[in-house]
Amino acid sequence: MASEPLAPQSKVMPPTENPLADAYLRVCKRCLMRGTYRTPARVEGRNRWYLYAAAAGLVRPFGFELVRRIDPKERDEGRNFTTDADTMIGSQRLDNLQACVVDVIRRNVPGDLIETGVWRGGASIFMRAVLHAYAITDRTVWLADSFQGLPKPDPERYPADAHDTLWAASALAASVDEVKANFSAYGLLDDQVRFLVGWFKDTLPTAPVDRLAVLRLDGDLYESTMDALTALYPRLSVGGYVIVDDYGAMESCRKAVDDFRADRGIDDPVERIDWTGVFWQRSR
Ligand SMILES: C[S@@+](CC[C@H](N)C(=O)[O-])C[C@H]1O[C@@H](n2cnc3c(N)ncnc32)[C@H](O)[C@@H]1O
């Protein structure tokens, strides 16, 4: 099935009347993205960076670190994940996340916030930061992840994932302890943050999440996107948001979203955030 045409790019960050919250959240975004720094490259031995890996290994015993200068524009657009950033998403997707969370707070759309596919936790940390900035104490941020990377494809059930190799990317595996430490670094690890550890197919159907106001999908695969939508969309409040990080970047993810929407007769317009992210607001 062909992908649905996207609605024209919408404003991702409407102005707010809360300058202090905005200022705090602006600093959070820059820190989470490492938007202002030259950061060390995380090098992988088994991929095309093997020369860097070898060189890094040579200099490390002498107390040096091999760093690669990254293009700030590439980082700002969320096009790489080789740095030490806490999130791989870029500024427009963080702005969109802020806009969606602030909007459900303002309009009292009931429910918690969840991200399915958190990696080092950056986008989820940011959701907790928005709750903090607006002094919201009655909503939880849920983090669903294997905390060991992506699953191997299941081509029998999900042919769209058949040739995916992301399961082998060790750089996509961040442990739950690493994510908790990242929350702590921002002073945001508390009982409003809860973890669903395991494969989505096992954790999401029985997750103790009653209602959601924001559902952020970032699991890349058809399987991961479909499992999250199937288990969680029924719990999304009317007026709440679905955000899909990989709609533009991953054909398999896009197909899962399009299949799910077609199957459920969802016709709320899909709005573009940036080169890959999209979102829609549930109207019924
Ligand atoms: C692209 S990364 C997420 C990036 C993150 N949202 C950020 O802000 O940088 C994808 C994550 O999804 C997780 N993941 C993908 N499919 C999964 C599944 N079926 N079950 C559990 N975790 C999954 C991986 O472990 C990985 O942490």
Image (tube, helix red, strand yellow):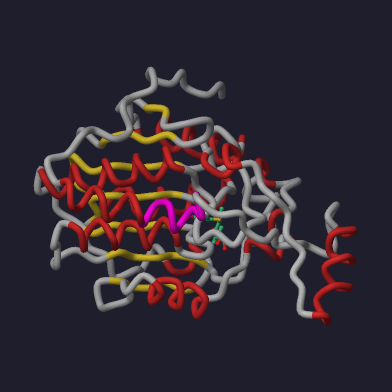
* Relative image position of residue 79 (x, y in whole percent): 60, 42
Q: Is residue 209 depicted above or below 184 in this figure?
A: above
Residue placed most toward the observer, 64 or 97:
64
Q: State the residue at coordinates (63%, 61%).
A: 172
| The quarter of the displayed image where residue 32 is located | bottom left
Residue placed most toward the observer, 35 or 170:
35
Per the image, is 34 magenta? Answer: yes
Per the image, is 218 magenta? Answer: no
Q: Is residue 171 depicted above or below 179 in this figure?
A: above
Q: State the residue at coordinates (26%, 43%).
A: 100
Left or right: 118 in relation to 265: right
Left or right: 209 in relation to 206: left
* Relative image position of residue 63 (x, y in whole percent): 76, 79
Q: State the residue at coordinates (66%, 47%).
A: 70
Q: State the residue at coordinates (50%, 56%).
A: 87
Ligand 1, image quadrant it occupies: bottom right
Q: Which residues are magenta?
A: 28-35
Q: What is the tally of numbered marks visible in this picture?
A: 0
Residue placed most toward the observer, 158 or 43:
43
* Relative image position of residue 153 (x, y in whole percent): 68, 55
Left or right: 48 in relation to 248: right
Q: Principal SS element in the magenta part?
A: helix
Quadrant of the snapshot with the N terminus: top right
* Relative image position of residue 89 (x, y in whole percent): 50, 47
| The quarter of the displayed image where residue 45 is located | bottom right
Quadrant of the snapshot with the C terminus: top left
